[in-house]
Amino acid sequence: MRLLAPAPGWTITSDVIIVGSGIAGLTTALQIRAYGYSVLLVTKARVDEGSTKWAQGGIAAALGPGDSPAAHEADTLKAGAGLCDLKAVHALVTEGPDAVARLIARGAVFDRAASGEIALTREGGHLTNRILHAGGDATGAEISRALLAAVTEDPGIEVIEHALVLDSLKSESGRVCGVTLHVIGEGSRDGVGRALAKAVILGTGGLGQVFAQTTNPSVSTGDGVALALRAGADVADVEFIQFHPTVLYLGAKSSGQQPLISEAVRGEGAILLNDAGEQFMIGIHPLADLAPRDVVAKAIMSQMLKAGTGHVWLDVSKVANFSERFPNIYQSCISHGINPTHDRIPVAPAAHYASGGVRVDLAGRSSVPGLYACGETACTGVHGANRLASNSLLEGLVFAARIADDIHRTLRQLPREEPIVGSDTEILLTPEIRTEIAQSMSVGAGVIRTKSSLEQTKAQLEKIATQVSKNPCVEAWETTNLFTLAKVIVASALIREETRGSHWREDFPNESSSWLKRIIEHMDSTGTLSQRYEEVAND
C-alpha cells in the first residue's frame, strides 16, 4: 500500500537516508558518518522540533558508585513485566555507559554535584540513583543541542527540513532503496520527490497524537511506523502505550500536547495526593510514589474514577529549591496560574510513549531488507510491556551505534538498486476525521480498556475509514497515518486478554502466563491486518 500522492518530480541520492532528527536519528547519522558514508537526514519540521528536546527527566545509565549494568538490567526487566527481550536489555545496559560517554564527548553537558561528579537522580522503577540530567529538567534540549551542533558541522550530512516522508521505494529484489517525500518550501525540491539510498533508517519518534491528550509534540503522528506497515514490515507490542502518570491537567476539554511534570519531581520528594489529601500510593507498591509508571497511572485513574474527578494532586512542598531544580516545569505551572511553591499541582495521565513499533533485531533491521528503525519508532524488545523511566534516550544511543555497525558491515557489498514502479493500492483519508480518531482512541483504548470499549472504538474506526479524500496534503497524510496506527493498536489490545504493564484490560485484570508472548502485526497490500505470536527471547 501507499499514500495517495503526486508522482515524484525530483530525485536526490545518498548512501543512507535517515528519517527523523531526535536522539535516534541524529546519533545514527553521526555514527554512520564515522564510517565515511554520506547521509541524507530528513525531518518533518525544523531539525530541533522532535520529541527529544521535550525529555525532562534524563537518561539512565549505570555510572554511579555501587550501581552496575546488572542492577540496571534487573530494574528494566521488572518494569517490562515479563515481555523484555533479554539480549536486547543486556545490550542496552552494558553498552549504555560507553554510549553516554560518546554523547558527552560530542559536547553534551550534564549537571554536576558539588563534588564535580555527574549528578544522578532517581525515577520510578529504579532502585538506585542512575539518571543523568541537564539544566535541571531540560535534559532533552541539551542532548538535542549537542547532537545538532555536531551534525551541522559535518559536510557529509545533508539535512532537509519541513519534509514529510510518505512511503518506501523498493527495488525488484524487494529491498528498500529509498523513500518518497513531500517538501514544504520553494525551489527545485518543493513538492513530492524521491530520495534513493542503499539503506533507510526510520527514527520518526512516537505516535502520541493518536490520542486526544499527549505529552508528544504535534509532529508525533507515527509516520515511520505507518510507512513500515505499508511497506510490509512487521510491527510488535503496539498495545503497550505508556501513559505518563503526571501531566499538568488543563481541563476536560484540553487536547493535543500537554505540559509534562517529570517523574524526577517525585524522585526528589514530591508526593501524590487524592482529593481527601491522602498519599494513596502507600500500600499499592513497595516504591509508593516511585512505582513504575503503569502502576502509578492505574492508581491515579482509580482515584479519579472513585472521586469522579479529572485529576489528582502533586504536592512538591518537600522538593528542595523546586524552582531552581525544575525551572521549566516551574515556569510552565506559573504560566497556567499555578504556583508550586504554595499550590498543589493538578495532574492526570496522558499518552506518553509507545513501547512497541517496527519489530527489529539487535542490529535494528526490520523484516524488510534495507529498512531499519531506531528509537521510539522501533520495537527492540528492550521495554517489554512497560518502559522503565529514562531508558528511551539510552535506547536511541545504543541501537544507533548497532545500526551503524551493521550498515558498515553490509553496505559496501551492496549494489545500488533502482526502484520499480508498482501498482500499489493507494489510500488517503480526509483530515477532518483526525479529532474523531483521537477522541475515540482516548475513550476506548486509553489507560483503561475493555472488550466493549475497544470494540466500540474499532466500529468507529471502520466507519471513519469510509471518509476518503482525493486531495493529497500534509494534513490528510498525517491523518491517514494516525488512522493506520489506531487500527493496529486496537487490534492488538483486543487480542491481549490480560492486564500487563501499560496494557490495562479491566475485564481481564490479572496477568496470564499464556500471554508471555508478543503480538506481531502485518498489513498486506489491501490494508488487511494479520497477527501471529512471537515467544519472548529469555535466554
Image (cartoon, rainbow, N blue to C red):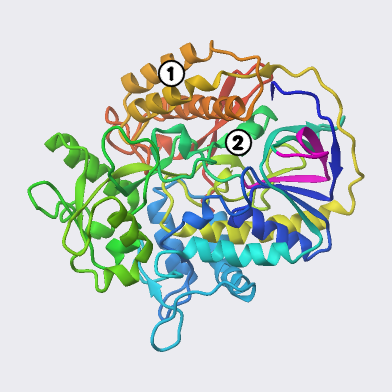
What is the quadrant of residue 326 in the picture? bottom left
- The residue wearing badge 1 is 458
Q: Please identify the quadrant where the N terminus is shown.
A: top right
Query: Is 6 above or below relative to 325?
Result: above
Q: Is residue 532 visible?
A: yes
Residue at the extreme bottom of the image, as rendered: 115
What span is colored magenta in the figure? 185-203
Disc number at residue 371? none
Taking the magenta stretch, the answer to whether it contains residue 196 is yes
Taking the magenta stretch, the answer to whether it contains residue 477 is no
- The residue wearing badge 2 is 223
Q: Residue at x 54, y 41 (%)?
A: 219
Residue nearest the viewer, comparing 174 with 77: 174
What is the quadrant of residue 468 in the picture? top right
Pick whichever of labels 2 and 1 is earlier in the sequence: 2
What is the quadrant of residue 297 in the picture? top left
Q: Amino acid at mark 1?
A: Lys
